[in-house]
Image (tube, rainbow, N blue to C red):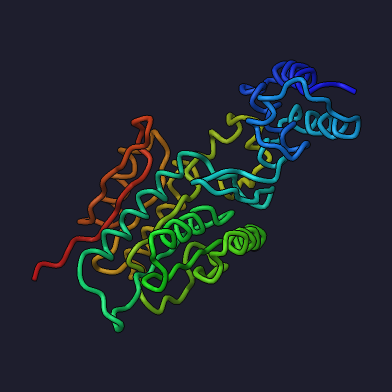
């Protein structure tokens, strides 16, 4: 029988040799997953004994990680916006930088709800999460708004081209008691027929340039290419969405919040000017000061 610290030391050395840039953290997370303990408990009790069965499970997890598989897929969960999401090869793993998108969407919904009196006959704010993937953005937004007392004042549609990813999104919606507030729709960007235009459209769409994909860390090769490949300039999918918004999917006073790459701040402004002339485009930065979310809106009507 061996101890927590011995397993962590050996696991860290193996993962570092395999090229992991976060070998110690990976080892702690994987051992915590095997022992059903959080990372804090693992670190706090290095002298604890670990049984042979658990040691073998940890060994199997190390083999998978050494082969490049993301820790999130091995554990089957990823923390995002204060919630634990189920993740697997059906969808992209939620990234910390995408939390900025949810943060801005939450603030925008609250601003709109507070902008004027709302009556029983006032229609709800219509929100679309385009390319929902694991459902992280839609579910996190609904849960955050429910905590602030927002329920019937909004409707949310989460769309996804991949039926497998859409099923994962549904599972996460159910897991966080948010599925009753989200309509999950299989669609390429947006459904062909939209009964009412959306007041707010959010999306973490593919924005990696095709030529860059082979240069990404090996862990991304386990994720669906469909969720990463944004075409030659990285903006093909976003371009397609802008065309749909221009053609009536976005309400006159609506806004789109779209995640972009850190090097696409100028490119997204040029794209908006080309596809939807006259629309505004303001880029919000993340905590690192990098371009992260484009706020795009049609010109406001003058009374």
Task: Name the foreground residue: 38 vs 139.
Answer: 38
Task: Name the foreground residue: 257 vs 190.
Answer: 257
Residue that extends furthest to the bottom in the rendered view of this protein: 121
Q: Is residue 204 left or right of residue 243?
A: right
The residue drawn where x is 41% and y is 60% is 145
Q: Quadrant of residue 116?
A: bottom left
Q: Quadrant of residue 50?
A: top right
The residue drawn where x is 21% and y is 73% is 117
Query: For the image shown, how many numbered marks are present on the structure?
Result: 0
Task: Name the foreground residue: 263 vs 203.
Answer: 203
Residue that extends furthest to the left in the rendered view of this protein: 303
The residue drawn where x is 53% and y is 53% is 136
Above or below residue 152? Residue 146 is above
Above or below residue 299? Residue 303 is below
In percent of width and height, residue 175 lies at 62, 60
Q: Quadrant of the N terminus?
A: top right
In percent of width and height, residue 16 lies at 69, 17
In percent of width and height, residue 195 lies at 40, 79
Q: Is residue 271 left or right of residue 88?
A: left
């Amino acid at each position: 029988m061996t101890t927590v610290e011995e397993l962590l030391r050996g696991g860290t050395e193996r993962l570092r040799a395999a090229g992991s840039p976060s070998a110690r953290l990976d080892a702690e997370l994987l051992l915590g997953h095997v022992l059903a303990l959080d990372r804090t408990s693992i670190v706090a009790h290095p002298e604890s004994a670990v049984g042979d069965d658990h040691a073998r499970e940890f060994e199997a997890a190390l083999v998978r990680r050494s082969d490049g598989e993301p820790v999130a897929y091995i554990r089957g969960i990823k923390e995002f916006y204060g919630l634990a999401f189920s993740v697997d090869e059906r969808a992209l793993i939620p990234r910390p930088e995408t939390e900025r998108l949810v943060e801005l969407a939450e603030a925008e919904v609250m601003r709109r709800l507070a902008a004027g009196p709302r009556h029983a006959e006032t229609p709800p704010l219509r929100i679309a999460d385009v390319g929902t993937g694991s459902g992280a953005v839609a579910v996190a937004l609904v849960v955050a708004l429910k905590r602030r007392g927002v329920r019937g004042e909004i409707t949310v549609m989460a769309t996804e081209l991949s039926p497998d990813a859409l099923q994962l999104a549904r599972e996460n919606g159910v897991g966080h008691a948010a599925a009753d507030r989200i309509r999950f729709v299989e669609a390429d960007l947006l459904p062909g027929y939209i009964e009412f235009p959306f007041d707010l459209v959010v999306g973490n769409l593919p924005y990696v340039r095709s030529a860059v994909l082979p240069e990404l860390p090996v862990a991304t090769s386990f994720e669906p290419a469909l969720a990463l490949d944004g075409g030659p300039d990285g903006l093909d999918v976003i371009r397609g969405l802008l065309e749909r918004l221009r053609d009536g999917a976005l309400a006159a006073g609506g806004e789109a919040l779209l995640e972009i790459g850190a090097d696409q701040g100028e490119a997204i402004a040029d794209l908006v000017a080309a596809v939807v002339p006259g629309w505004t485009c303001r880029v919000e930065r993340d905590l690192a000061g990098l371009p992260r979310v484009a706020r795009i809106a049609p010109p406001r009507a003058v009374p």
